[in-house]
Image: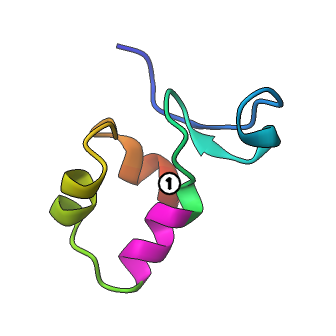
Amino acid sequence: MSRVEVVCELDVMSGDPGISGTRILPETIAANLRTGYHIDLIFRACPILPDEAIEAAVR
């Protein structure tokens, strides 16, 4: 399995940072955590997220 990272690719979401392999913004994950969302709720809302996505988003 490849490492989950925050990547910027010009041909994906106009180069905005995203979690590798998804179109989910790390800022969205970080904002959800700041407002008190539990990690389990984030994963239920975004089942495509790899397990390591939360760590990558807050790095």
The residue depicted at 25 percent of the width and 42 percent of the height is 47
The residue depicted at 24 percent of the width and 52 percent of the height is 43
Q: Is residue 53 above or below residue 20?
A: below
- Determine the main secondary structure of the stretch shown in magenta: helix
From the top left corner, tell me how far across and down residue 15 is, in percent: 80, 40
45 vs 16, left or right, is: left
From the top left corner, tell me how far across and down residue 40 is, in percent: 16, 60
From the top left corner, tell me how far across and down residue 10 is, in percent: 83, 31
The span picked out in magenta is 28-34
From the top left corner, tell me how far across and down residue 24 is, in percent: 51, 47
Q: Is residue 31 above or below residue 5?
A: below
Disc 1, SS: helix
Residue 33 is a magenta residue: yes
Using the image as rendered, state which of residue 56 and residue 26 is in the foreground.
26
The residue depicted at 69 percent of the width and 47 percent of the height is 17
Q: Is residue 39 above or below residue 51?
A: below
Using the image as rendered, state which of residue 47 and residue 36 is in the foreground.
47
Using the image as rendered, state which of residue 10 and residue 54 is in the foreground.
10
Residue for badge 1: 57
Say few, some or many: other residues with alpha carbon within 10 Å of mark 1 (under 14 / 14 to 19 / 20 or more).
Answer: many
